[in-house]
Amino acid sequence: MKIGDRVRLMKGTEEGVVVKLLDKSLVEVEIEDGFAIPVLQSELVVVSSDESSAFDRPQTQPKKTTHKKESTSPKPQLKGYHLAIIPLNDHLHSLYFINPLKEDIVLLANEVNGKNEEKTILIDKVLSENYSKITERDLDHLNTWSPFTFTILVENPKWSIPIRPEKITLKIRAKDFQKELIDIPFLNKKGYLIPLFQKSSESIQPDKIDPEKLKNSFFEGNEKPEFQFKKNNNSNIPEIDLHIESIDPNYEKLPKEDILNIQLQKFEQKLNEAIMAGLDDIIFIHGVGNGVLRNKIHKQLSQHDNIQFFKDTHKEKFGYGATLVKIK
């Protein structure tokens, strides 16, 4: 028995398609309404094409992870990648990634936990103007759904400068289900549609970096008001404020798990910029709080090849709320 085989349950009349091999004796079968169930191979029988013809049942092509829409129908119009959520019943919902663009892509879909660790749930090639099923989730436990990240690599069919992989992060919230069900393009089912905002699909050239200009920027006011480099009064060591109110003025609307991720992303960004600029030292002001952000930063610094050492600094001013980083 293999993926794509059309099968029938021996103890019932339901038919479906094998979509996943769970182990040597267990497979996952998607029945007619899109609901996937685990079934022992010993409880299934493969439906042959001859049997379908004899009983005047239309032959069903084996399902693949991605699906082509019939060319006779007009192409639905979508701009950019989308996530579709299709209700299977009052509780269970299927999640699909839709690629309406003209390029084939390779998709890596991950879940993210509270420690900012990621677990892969799907790696698939999604053809142009096509879609791929990611997973299923129970709407009753929406508050426990982990954020998703989608890493997208556009396929290069011809010799050209490759487009750099793009990573999109999505947290599905209750407000995404406060709309009417709509007809989902390509899927021909009713559900909810969430746009995944991303950069232009054109070829992206790597940014050219001027080390001197980048280095000088650490001692000048950043044009963006929500984040500034501060020059230390006692030395030429730049100070980076990682308090969430300095990064995002609308932080009060953010979930707690998102705040930590935003702070860590800003820390990683500014540390990399400091290394590229050739700085010797940099200070990160993370505050004391419950120590979670400080511990995360110290853990990353302890594993970084370009860091000579780090230590708590300015205790008279910040207590244990600031870290000095010495760059190799």
Image: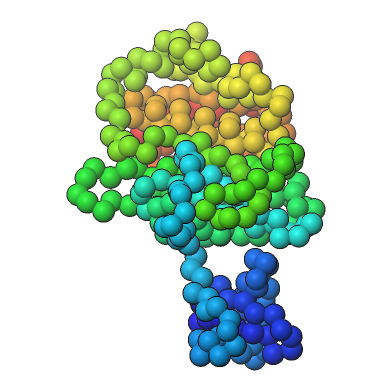
103 on left or right of 242: left
> Total marks drawn?
0
Q: Nearer the viewer, residue 78 or 53?
A: 53
Q: Residue at x 34, y 42 (%)?
A: 164
Residue 203: quadrant of the picture: top left
Residue 68: quadrant of the picture: bottom left
Q: Nearer the viewer, residue 249 or 188?
A: 188
Taking 241 as reference, is 7 above or below it? below
Q: Nearer the viewer, residue 328 or 241?
A: 241
Q: Residue at x 69, y 40 (%)?
A: 176
Q: Can the viewer see residue 148 in this picture?
A: no
Q: Can the viewer see residue 266 in this picture?
A: yes
Measured from the top left, where is residue 12 in percent x and y? 74, 85
Q: Residue at x 71, y 60 (%)?
A: 88
Measured from the top left, where is residue 67 in percent x and y? 48, 62
303 on left or right of 103: right
Taking 271 as reference, is 4 above or below it? below
Taking 78 as reference, is 16 above or below it? below
Q: Residue at x 65, y 45 (%)?
A: 182
Q: How is the image coloured?
A: rainbow
328 on left or right of 322: left
Measured from the top left, where is residue 138 in percent x and y? 74, 57
Measured from the top left, where is residue 132 in percent x and y? 51, 58
Taking 44 as reference, is 28 above or below it? above
* Furthest residue toward left: 159
Look at the image and tell me in which quarter the C terminus lies.
top left
* Furthest residue toward front: 56
